Amino acid sequence: MTPIRLYDLAASGRRFSPYCWRARLSLARKGLPYETVPVAFTEIPTILDGQQKTVPVIDDGGRIVRDSWAIAEHLEATYPDRPALFGGEAGRAACRFAESWANSILPLIGPIVLMDIHALLAPADQAHFRRTRETRFGRPLEEVVAGREARVAPLREALTPLRLTLRAQPFVGGTEPNYGDFAVWGSLRWPLTVATIEILAADDPVLVWYRAVAEAVGLAGEA
Amino acid sequence: MTPIRLYDLAASGRRFSPYCWRARLSLARKGLPYETVPVAFTEIPTILDGQQKTVPVIDDGGRIVRDSWAIAEHLEATYPDRPALFGGEAGRAACRFAESWANSILPLIGPIVLMDIHALLAPADQAHFRRTRETRFGRPLEEVVAGREARVAPLREALTPLRLTLRAQPFVGGTEPNYGDFAVWGSLRWPLTVATIEILAADDPVLVWYRAVAEAVGLAGEA
């Protein structure tokens, strides 16, 4: 089988996109041969057909699929005999909810790590990143991250639903991780990859889960 | 079949416990005959065997089950041929996550509605409620609710994961509501039953879902 190609956001050798990680964990969970192609922000328009605006995008034997949710759906439909990403229709719906929750914590993380990401980027990417993010936030990046130390506690607090869940079961998906776990993992991988301040306390049970998810999909060296 | 008895927190004719509503919607979803027994806070130690400390409690033909999650598990195991509350093992795990999220918004709601609940209680219950809640919050109820208008916006914001989910599907459970929906519904039913200020904007898609859940389980008159 030709390896699936995953176009994966990268800078200074680090892969930090929460969405790309969701796709990568989905590929790993399915046990499919894949290779990742590092892509800088400003390189995205040059990959594949030149029509891509975001990553992750996968090339699965000529079939191009973009967006982490769509990639998971594609993998689940195309490789149903491999370990499940959703676990049936109810599981699929539940993964959507977990993904929505995982997305809702991203705005708590951005204002902590924006300048840390900026520092990793090549000059052309820095200009692109600053322009797009300053448009989104309406002020200079330096102002967005000012006082960021005070934003760590609210982020940790926002993870309460995950901690409550982990008291009852080892994974969001139950006894095995599923796409719900991967969605949350991706959101946390983002700051854990780039942040220059401590994101999670060393005794946070979230970290135990974080390592267990990586181990379950065979990416233990990545956690 | 003898109706299942649901012991249900009540005051001034209103049923406002988020946990009791989770049990009630689970009973309704299963289509089981049931009756509710209104219980005031200070009456809880007098029901059944006198050993109960919280409601909901159900009496299912002599089998006593307390705690809304345990009640849902009991109903799912005992009446598997009725509509599913969880939808298999992955669905069950996902419902636990949805319930954890639903619980995490309760602390945003309490400081809005505490005095509204107090106003509905009989004198003996008022004393009990004030004593237990002031111990929990460490200050007078009146101080806890001071400036509560400013707490409505953060509560609405906290519902973002639900709104994102509802863009993709009609229910947390997918095309049909499940216990994940009931858990969230119960959390919202609480302020929507007692609050004397507007909790959700009239055009919030959460309200469309809220009515649809009630309708799906045959409790449309309750939404």
Image (cartoon, coloured by chain):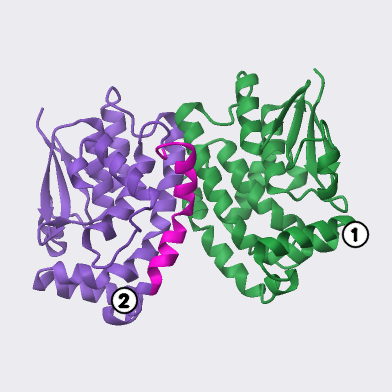
Chain colours: A green, B purple
Q: CA distance from mark 2 to mark 1?
A: 51 Å
Residue A174 seen in the figure: no
Estimate the x, y position of residue B154 in percent, counting from the top left: 44, 65
Residues in magenta?
Answer: B150-172
Residue tagged 1: A123
- Few, some or many C-alpha atoms within 10 Å of disc 1 (few <14, some 14-19, many ≥20)? few
Residue at mark 2: chain:
B
Residue under disc 2 on the same chain as residue under disc 1: no
Amino acid type for the residue under numbered disc 2: Val
Give the percent coordinates (x, y) of residue B142. 27, 81
Q: Please tell me whether residue B65 is drawn above or below residue A5 in the rendered image.
A: below
User: In the picture shown, does residue B128 fall above or below A76?
Assistant: below
Residue A56 image point, x, y percent? 73, 39
Res A193 seen here: yes
> Circle 1 — which element?
helix
Is A45 covered by the magenta stretch?
Answer: no
Tell me which residue sits at (27%, 53%) in the image: B189
Chain letter for mark 1: A
**Residue type at mark 1?**
Pro
Question: Which residue bears the numbered disc 2?
Answer: B145
A179 with respect to A14 (left or right): left
Horizontal relation, residue B49 to residue B181: left or right? left
